[in-house]
Structure formats: structure tokens, C-alpha cells
Image (tube, coloured by chain):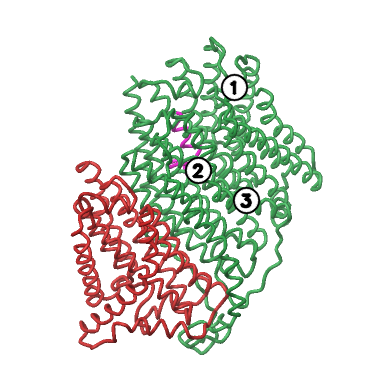
Amino acid sequence: MENIFAGLVLFPFLIALALVFVKTNTGRRITVYSGCGIIMAAVALFAGNTIFTGTTRTAFPSTHAIDMVMLCAEFAIMILVVVLSTKHKKHYCSLLSIAQTLLIAYIELTKPLHEPVAHVVSDRLSAVMCLIVGIIGCLICIYAVGYMRRYHEHHKEYADRRTFFFPMLFVFIGAMFGLVLSSNLIWIYFFWEITSVSSFLLIGYTKTKEAIKNSFRALWMNLLGGLAFAIGIGICVFKLDVYTLGDLVASTGDMAVLAVCLLGIAGLTKSAQLPFSRWLLGAMVAPTPTSALLHSATMVKAGVYLLIRLSPAMTGNYAGMIVSLIGGITFFVASMLAITHSDGKKILAYSTVSNLGLITACAGVGIEEGAWAGILLMIFHAVSKSMLFQGVGAIENTTGSRDIEDMHGLICKLPKLAVIMMIGIIGMFIAPFGMLVSKWAALKAYIDADNVILVCLLCFGSSTTLFYWAKWLGKVLTHVAGVKPMTDLTTNGQWVSMWIHAALGILLCALFPVISLLAIEPMLHEMFGSVNAHILTVEDMIIMVLMLFIIMVIPFISKILVKRFPYKPSLEYMSGINMGDNRKFDDAMHEDKKVFLAGWYMEDMFGERKLWIPSVAVSTAVIVIILIMAVGGAI
Amino acid sequence: MITQIICALLYVIIAPFLGGLLAGIDRKITARMQGRIGPSIFQPFYDVAKLLNKQIMKINNMQYPFALCFLIFVVITGALFFGGADILLVFFTLTTAALFFILEAATTNSPFSVMGSEREIIQMLAYEPMMLLVAVGFYMANGTFSVAEIINAEYSSILRMPGLFIGFLYILTIKLRKSPFDLSTSHHAHQEVVKGITTELSGRMFAFVEIAHWYENVFLLGVIGLFIINASWWSIPLALVVIALCYFMEILIDNCSARVKWNLMFRSAWLVTLIFGVANIIILQYVLK
């Protein structure tokens, strides 16, 4: 296991190092493709083995030397943050960073481990996380090669910093492997900080004023989470004498609840829950592969991963209350806000926040059904969201716009990309696809956890979710007369990545009963000790798979239908004033007027101006009040 | 299991006839309320038969498959319901069906059709929370989501979920596309929406959509029945009476109200959901448990 861990974590760092020195397009392509190939193969082998055999491996019982190296690295990160913050006069970031690094150093130096404890534990959950990070993350890197080339052809105004960009992507992936495989809290914290800082650096890629502002917002919010994490570790070590995540979950008492609360808040910041959502929404100023990486495979998944790990310790206590309430509120509010935007990336960002809220709430109810739904949601969301970001990025590179109003008639302009978008979108909200199945399970979990508030938030939130996806899907599929296909500038590498995503998305839906049986149910058994039968009955799963089959044959049916009933064009109804080409009508001055159809955004009902401040206020109040209660309970 | 499959099959075969007849009776009663004699109650069948034989005029090649999918998924919804499946699954499938209907209209790029499809999404936004809460209510009242088990409960579900019943009737007006909530389409083509979401449908395509609506209406009335039916035999005739009363009330409302604006529909539907639906769920959770 030592070798596997070292390989998975260090190999991406090596690739990153190599990419610093590769300056040509070809060289970069070869390095990234081969590196990603090796990582994907290694992850598949390791995870497949862990899932099928069910072995839990442990490693690194005593690690004084590595701990010291990590401590030095943490100080290096702190110095980097302080230097950059001072340069841009954001001193609060320096303060946050110094405070937590000193705290961790104090813990590390004054309370060394008495007895050997496994620092690395790999079980089924880590294996599944490795698969998400490895496969989706690497596909995004492959996509990024072609995307960044086009990006710099379009955006001459930004300095070409690709020798910085690609290494950061791989650092991110390496750190994520470290995070999901570590069991020692200080190790998890170390990788946690690396992801915070590398996301900060990636968001500021273009160095515009807005990018710098947003990157510092991401930094301080995540550092705040890091501080909560560090205090949580302090409580674990000094009060509970606990060094690993597994032991923390097993320990009881008010002090343990407080520690879980603090780690939970760290998880909430990382997964961009209210009131910390702003950083993820601001992250879209970065080039699309960064957004795809942050939103699907890495960053935010680190937050929900931690929460799902903590889930058994959150059953019916203050920690569970904070996490589930914040999750539920975020799910509902973010899905309403998504309605009011027409910027494709912004909708995706809100939808990520919203879906993460659902996963967070699933973790917060602290029962095995919730965790089942949460894990499935995490898998399906990673695939669909990564695909959607890549689709929007490719569309933007070709058409120059990512506004969904400009995607009107995309099926005529860029048919292949429209199909990618369609698969991504229907995967997000329609039966029998993955997200809906998981949402269904989530609803059952909330009911069984007797959590009426979450049930209601989910019912209302599903309808708002439905609204923005249906609107977008309708836009993409609109058939506009007389529109000629455009030349698609998408590169082969991008296509490979997107089609693999599409295939994965559909395959996962078809195989989800098997995945549930082989991977997730045993995983829950490891986490909760016992599992109540099946969460969805076998008949229901079969019905879902049959429905998927019906939807899959639609394209073939339509081929036959088109053949049997050949295209017999007829004019659209425009109250008799259609000018004969379905594009223009005869206006009051008897002149041709172009038909323009726009979607609904309902700014005055669901707008940010109306909802943002109240929702931040409510969520902050929830966190502060319950945290004070938890502190009171512990003291 | 066998009975369940037979029930589902019976629905697939009989529902269009029941639904068509229902539409005919609806037109008759409406005509009488307006002081007209009205067409024969078999008129909807004649209409659809004629449509089936007419030439199809298409705007594009995507319309037909989507219209067909709408029909298929509505039939699946009803078959799952009458076959005694999970009520949540039933509602989710209905949502999928509705999405196909929306897409059929959205692909046309025709002003009235697209407006209809957008209004249809607003309608879904309005009724979806109540529908899911009804499913949750059935679970809380009976301890199961399975329709087959709900109808074998000792007491009728409505005794524990009267608020949800009222809320469901409210959104039923939206689902049945009755005035004042007939925003996405209208029975009379001379109004501002023209025929809304169905504007660009013709011939066999339109016939499929009409038949799908018959299936859908029978299913929706079935959900009303689910509130009433319990293990005793007399609950079935009682359910039929309640269904007849509710449907008559829908026709009455249809005839004495004018179409409202979308925001009134949306706000009032969510308000009703909050007052009757959520409150009923809270009572189920904390008082009746």
C-alpha cells in the first residue's frame, strides 16, 4: 500500500514538474496524454481491485520524517500565501493562513503520536473517490490541452501561462489522491490546504482585476474552512486523544460532536455551501478546464467526501443539524438563482452548488440511505457536470458565446456538441437517469430520517431544478429554419474526452444497480456497520433500466419515422404573417421583422438581488447559532 | 404480481376509451352549462379518427418522435400506477413524459408553440412540489410508497391527508389544463395563446397527443381514487363518486373563470402547497405518527 499511495500521489507531481519545462504544443500533448493514460490505468487497477476484493489496506504506521517534510511544505505554502496576499494588500488572507499553520505546527510538535497509527487507509469509498478523481480529472486534463490552445488563439490579451496552468492541474489531482487516501487528520489537512491554494492560483490564471478579486475570495473562504479544520484537529488531539478520521467517527460525547461540527464547517466551505457559495461562482472567470475540475472531479468533491466520511458521526446531533440544514437551504436557494441567469457557466455553477447541497444534506441526516444517495449523487454529478462544462467550453471556443440564449438552435449549428449538451442535461434531472434516481433515494432518506424540513426543501427545489434544465434543453434542441452548420473548432482530444464522458454517463445509469450492489452497499456496511436491505427495490431498478432502454432507442425510432414519413416542410403558424421562410414576419409597417424568441428568467421573483442577502443571513445564522449550542454542550 | 400486470394491461387497453368518453362528457356538460346542446359524447373519438387519417405537416423531423415519446411515457406512467408500483416513480415518469411534450413544442421555433412550451414549464414549476408532497404524504400515512399496498390500507388515506387532497385538487386544474390555469394551451384557438403548445401539431401527431391526454386524465383521476380506496369493497364505488364530483367541479370552475396570469397561478399554487401540503405533512409527522 505504501507504494500505491506514493505512486498515486507523487506521479502526478512528477508530471507537473515535467510540464513546467515542456514549452511546445506537441510536447505538452504527449506528456499530458501519456501521464493521464498511466494515471487512469493505475487508478482503474487499484480501485477495481479494492472494490471487488473488498480489501481495506493500511499503511505508514509511523512517519515522523514524512510529517516533518509536510510541516515544512505547509510553512512554504503559508509563505507563498503571505507573499501574494501582501502584494495584493489582502492581509486577512495572511492572518488566516498564519493562524492555522502555527496551530497545526503547535499540534504536530507538542503532541507527537504515542503509538503507531495507520496514516493511510484505503477502503471502497476511497477507491470510488480515486476513480472519480483519476478518470474524470484526467479526462479534463486531456480536454484542456486542446482547449487551452484555442483559448490563447482567441484571447490574445491574456499572457500565455500554460507552463504554469498544466502543472497546477496535476498538482491538484495528486493532492486529491492524497486527501481521499489519508486517514490521519493532519495528513488530510495538509492535502486540503494544497487544494485550497492551487484552486486559488488556478482561478487567478488570467490575472485580470476580476480574476484576482475572485481568486482571493476563494482563498479566504477556503482558508476560513482550513482554520475550522485546524481547530477541529486541535480538539481531536488535545481533548479526545484521536488522530485519525476513523477514530473520530467512532468516538462519542459532546466534545466529539464539536470537533465534527468544525470539520463539517470546513467541508461546507470547500463544497461551496451557503454562505460560502460565492467563491465557486466567482471561479468561473478561469478557463473552462479549471471550472470543470473544480466543479466535478476535485475541489468541491473533497468537501462532500469529508462530510460523507463523517456521516455516521452526524446522526441526530448538532453537527448533523448544521450540515443537513445548510445543505437543504443551499439546494433550494441555488436552484432558484440558477433560473435567473442566462450565462451557461453561471447556470452550471449554481447547479453545482445546488446539487452539492443535496449531497451535503444526504450526509447530514446520518443514516445509511442518505449516504447511499449521497455517494451515487457524487458519482453521477461528477460525470454529467464535467461533460457539461466541457461542452459549454467547446461551444464558447467555436461561437464566442456561452450565453444560453445564443445556444438557440444549437442542434442546427453544432449538432455534435448539441448532442453532448443534451446527454449532459437529461442526465441531470430526468428519470431514469442517475441524478434523478439518487434524488429519489435522497427523498426517501430524508423521510426516514424524520426530517420534514429537508423533505419540503427537496420537493420545492426539484421543481426549480426542473425549470432551468428544461428551459436550456429546449433552447439547445430548437430547430431554426435556414441555419447552416458552423465549422466546429473542437480538437480531437476534446472530442475523446467528451464522448468518453457521454458513454460513461449512460453506462453508469444502465449499470447502477450493479454498482450499488457491488460497491456502495458493502461500502455502507463498512461505514455504518449494518445496512437495511435495498434502498430502492430490485423491481424499481429494473423498471428504471427498461425506461433507459426505451429512451436509448428513440434516435433509431426517429430515423425510421423520418424515413417512413419524409420531411414535408410546412410553415409555422404566425397568425398568417409568416414571410415564408419561418424566420421573418410582416410587421405593422409591412416590413420584414426577424422572429426572436427568448427564454424566461423571472429576475424579479428569483433574482439574486432579492434572494442573496436573506439566504446568506439565514445560513450564517444557522451555522453560528448551532455552533454556539455545540460549543456550549462541549464545555 | 399477476393481478398487477393484468391491471396495468387493462389500463393500457381501456384508458383511451374511458378518457375519450370523459372528454366527450366534459364537452357535453360544458355545452349545457353554456346553454348549448353540444356535440355527441362520442365526438372526441370521431375527431381523433379523422386526425389519424390526415396528412402530417411537420415543421422539423424532431417533432414526431417527441410526440410519440410523450404518448409512450404517459402510458408507462399510468401502467405503473395501475400496476401498483412506487408512487414516486410514477410521478417522476410523468415528469419525463411532460418534458417530451415540452421539447416537441420547443423544437419548432414557432412563436405560439414555444410560448406554450415555456408556459408549460412554468406550470410544472407550479405543480411539481405539491405532487411530490402528495407522494410523501401517502408514504407517511400508510408507511409505503407502493400503490398496491396503499389501496389495501385499513383506512382511506384521505382521513390523514385532507390538506394534501385539497392541494392536489388545486394543481389538478393545472394538470387537466382547465381554466383559470389553461396557460400553455387552450381549447379555443381564437385566444391570445392560439393553441399554445399544440399549435404546430397536425394529423397523426396531434392524434397521439390527444390520446396521451386521455391516458393522462384517467391516470390523474386514478390518483384521486387512491386517496379514497382502502381494503373494504365499498370504498371503490365511493371513490368513483368522489372522482365524478371532483371532475364535475373542475368543469364548473373551467366554465366560470377566466385565464389568470402566470405569476398568479405560480404564487397561488406554491401558497396552497405551503398552507395545505406542508402543513399536512407536518401534522402527519408530529401529531398523527
Q: Nearer the viewer, residue A192 or B57?
A: B57
Q: Which residue type carries mark 1?
A: Thr
Position of residue A634 measured from the top left corner of the image (x, y, whole percent): 34, 21
How far apart are the alpha carbons under marks 1 and 2?
A: 25 Å
Position of residue A381 measured from the top left corner of the image (x, y, whole percent): 53, 47
Residue B255 falls in image quadrant: bottom left
Q: Determine contact: label 1, label 3, CB under 8 Å.
A: no
B56 versus A429 height, above or below = below
A276 in magenta:
yes
Q: Which residues are magenta?
A: A263-278
Residue B273 falls in image quadrant: bottom left
**The chain drawn green is chain what?**
A
Q: Which residue is mark 2?
A: A376
Q: Determine contact: label 2, label 3, CB under 8 Å.
A: no
Q: Which residue is mark 1?
A: A58
Give the chain letter at badge 1.
A
| Residue depicted at x 55% and y 18% | A105
Report helix, strand or loop for mark 2: helix
**Mark 2 or mark 3, which has the lower sequence index?**
2
Question: Of all residues shown, which one is farthest toward the top?
Answer: A114
Report helix, strand or loop for mark 3: helix
The quarter of the rendered structure image containing the C terminus of chain A is: top left
Q: Check if mark 1 and mark 3 are on a common chain.
A: yes
Badge 1 density bin: few <14, some 14–19, many ≥20, Cα 10 Å: some
